[in-house]
Amino acid sequence: MTPQERMLHTQRATALLQSAWQEGRIAHAYCFHGPHGSGKQALSMLFAASVNCENIASNKGLWPCGECKSCKQARSLQHPNITYVFPTPAPKSGTNQSTMLSGLTDIQVENIRNEMHKKGQDPFYHMSIDGARAIRVASIRAAKRGASMSASQSGRRFLLVFEADKMNQEAANAFLKTLEEPGAELTIILTTARKDMMLDTIMSRCQQVQLHPFDEEQIAAYMQHTQQIDEERATFIARLSKGSISQATALLDEDVNGLREEALNWMRQCLRPRSYAPEVTKLNELFGRQRDVARTKNLLALLQVWLRDALIIQQEGNRDHVVNIDQEQALERFVGAFGQANFSEAIRVIDEAVDYLNGNVQIAVALTRLAIRLRRVFFAQTREQ
């Protein structure tokens, strides 16, 4: 069992799928939903690979052998029975759009292939495709054509739709027709972290499967094993990750201390009593020019961890749970200055800002909106200056 499979083994959803397979009642459509980094896409890939594995028996667990031809095809994302759909950049206007890659530039196609290769190497990897803001109708139609063709090898067909909430209206309507007319031996799996953004008509036709955040201990052990980092760093990153494998992996490449200082400086500017707007606008524009959504999310994650630590101190909780233990004096001063603030509400509005970023809004716009909402939280008891 690979490290990824061991992590998925802890998800209750895995047992549900194994039971469905053993009893011969695989549904024609599922929706895997849960927070970012909870393994939705990885589990969909594991399920498709397992059902198509040449050496696996359904009574021995939901784990492909990894060695047969089918497993190797699945791992390289080249299995003829497994079709993938995900957000892509907008094609050039007026071009033929018969496939998901039609109308894209050579650079865009190369970017997509590189990201798919990384996804095949690590199913928990979050693909970052430049300019990919929506799942387009051409992708849905191409997938539907592929699913209706005669299978070139034995097994069951799967259509995996990642970030399904990003289907545009035309794509969603076309996809609904696919759900209404499922082909024989075809299973469709949608994955989404934004279940509330999905059409009710689509959700009602899917068996819904919820995934949950991983425990900090699980993530720390996983990071130690897969990234060869020491226990102290793995534990720190796990605490910052909010139960998300993809978030933990993203933080590996960051100067966490430097990014934390950027996050705190941004918040300090937001919470200045007077004349906060010019400096905050300048910082928001700087982050916007960097056009790095993943880094901005990491910044917001560090901000949330800081606020959780402040909440522990505010409520006189167990300080063993404080993550930013090296900044305990600074946290004390922060709580002293904003002791009446509703830190839980501040954490919640940052969660909403992350969802806002996931909707592909501009970074500067998302941060400006967040700054205004944080000021309302922190100065709820006082008149704005």
Image (cartoon, grey):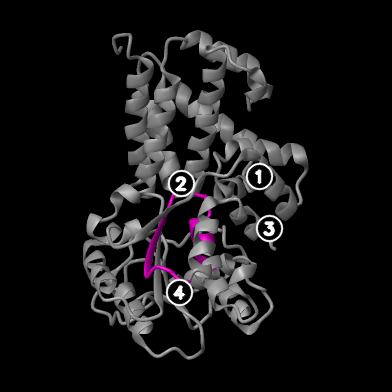
Going by the numbered disc 2, the residue's amino acid type is Pro
Going by the numbered disc 1, the residue's amino acid type is Gln
Residue 26 highlighted magenta (yes or no)? yes
| Residue range of the region highlighted in magenta in the rendering | 24-45
Check disc 1: other Cα within 10 Å, few if <14, some if 14-19, many if 20+: some
Nearer-the-camera pick, 182 or 352: 182
User: Residue 8: x and y, percent?
Assistant: 59, 55
Nearer-the-camera pick, 163 or 199: 199
Q: CA distance from mark 3 to mark 1?
A: 11 Å
Kindly identify which residue carries mark 4.
109
Q: CA distance from mark 1 to mark 2?
A: 16 Å
Left or right: 288 in relation to 68: left
Residue 18 is drawn in which quadrant?
bottom right
Going by the numbered disc 3, the residue's amino acid type is Pro
Q: CA distance from mark 2 to mark 3?
A: 20 Å
**Which dot marks residue 3?**
3
Label 3 sits on a secondary structure element that is: helix
User: Residue 178: x and y, percent?
Assistant: 28, 73
Contact? badges 2 and 3 (CB < 8 Å): no
Q: CA distance from mark 2 to mark 4?
A: 28 Å
Kindly identify which residue carries mark 1.
218
Left or right: 326 in relation to 26: right
Q: CA distance from mark 4 to mark 3?
A: 30 Å
Of labels 2 and 3, earlier in sequence is 3
**Which dot marks residue 35?**
2
Q: Residue at x 62, y 65 (%)?
A: 61
User: Residue 193: x and y, percent?
Assistant: 41, 50
